Amino acid sequence: MSMSHSHTHSHDHPHVHEHADSGDGRSRKLLFAFVLTTLMMVAEVVGGAWSGSLALIADAGHMMVDALALLLAFVGAWMATRPADARRSYGYGRMEVLIGFVNALSQFVLVGWIIYEAVTRLLHPGEILSGVMFVVAIIGLLVNVLVLRMLHGHAHDDVNLAGASLHVLGDLLGSVAAVLAALAIRWFGWLWADPVLSLLVGLLILNSAWRLLRMSAHILLEGVPDGMDSAAVEVSLRGADPSIRNVHHLHVWQLASGSRMATLHAELQEPADSAQALRAIKRMLLENFGIQHVTVQIDPGECLDQPQNCTGHGHP
């Protein structure tokens, strides 16, 4: 078909949430992590109240937030596997990004509470039963290592699991701090070690929470995927096939983690085979940039949109 058939659109739908195939396995991991975290939270509440340790109480508070975060992550993973419907044509894949964003925000609240409690304990130290504190902290450490190993495999490319893993990592650091504080109190009588180590853990959590917040916000704002240069994509597309005269109105973004999408206008030589050009464009985007969902508009000659809409990058 030549350009004279005007205004051709092509939509490639391999469905947008390609990582949903493993959604059931991830859901099971998240549910198991939620159960373990909830049980450990109860143990730390009891142990913290019994021993008088802020590190344990802070970690129990962290685990309470984590239990909710893991439950939300489980719901997000389940919803991400739901098919598209009449009202949500892209499905529910972005739910995982939204939950990751909320999880990051919840960490800021938690860190604020830990800092407040640590300062209070530094000003007004109290008796701590280091033996009880040590035993509970060791159990918490082992549980957190187990949960983190379960979630870590996919966390690098899944904002939902990254959010859950961030919470568990904070728990792990909290357990390490509690173990060290218990030893310091038992061997040296340093009551200040408990709030100080809790404070340091809070600052470490804050750094990780900021990174997750930026990553999830970038996806929600439909920014260009990290590590991708839209100008370089445009240059590559112009050389994808001899029939392509020009490419403009290019937009690349992510619907959810690992779900890259692109829309673009292509001007073809006259005469030209639009089907051949479309195949070349889709092959180029998939093989070179990992973009599976592509919408291409073939312009008959000059761009049919307003001039200001035919240039620039970003999402329409």
Image (tube, helix red, strand yellow):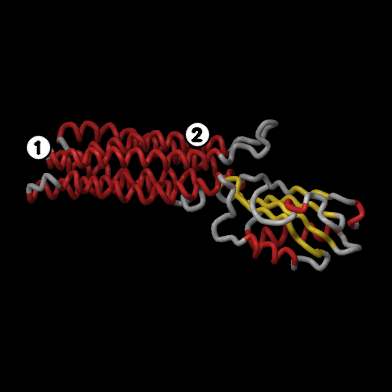
Residue at image location 84% in from the left, 50% down from the top: 8
Against 111, residue 302 (above or below) is: below
Q: Give the crowd class for mark 2: few <14, some 14-19, many >=20 residues within 10 Å.
A: some
Identify which residue, 211 or 40, lies in the foreground. 211
SS under mark 1: loop
The residue where tag 2 is placed is 75
Residue type for callout 2: Val
Residue 50: x, y in percent? 16, 32
Q: Is residue 38 above or below residue 231?
A: above
Residue for badge 1: 127
Horizontal and vertical percent for residue 254? 60, 49
Name the disc covering residue 264, or none.
none
Query: Residue at 51% across / 37% down in the picture?
Result: 76
> Position of 188 compared to 100: left or right?
left
Picture quarter containing residue 229? bottom right
Q: Nearer the viewer, mark 1 or mark 2?
A: 1
Q: Secondary structure at mark 2?
A: helix
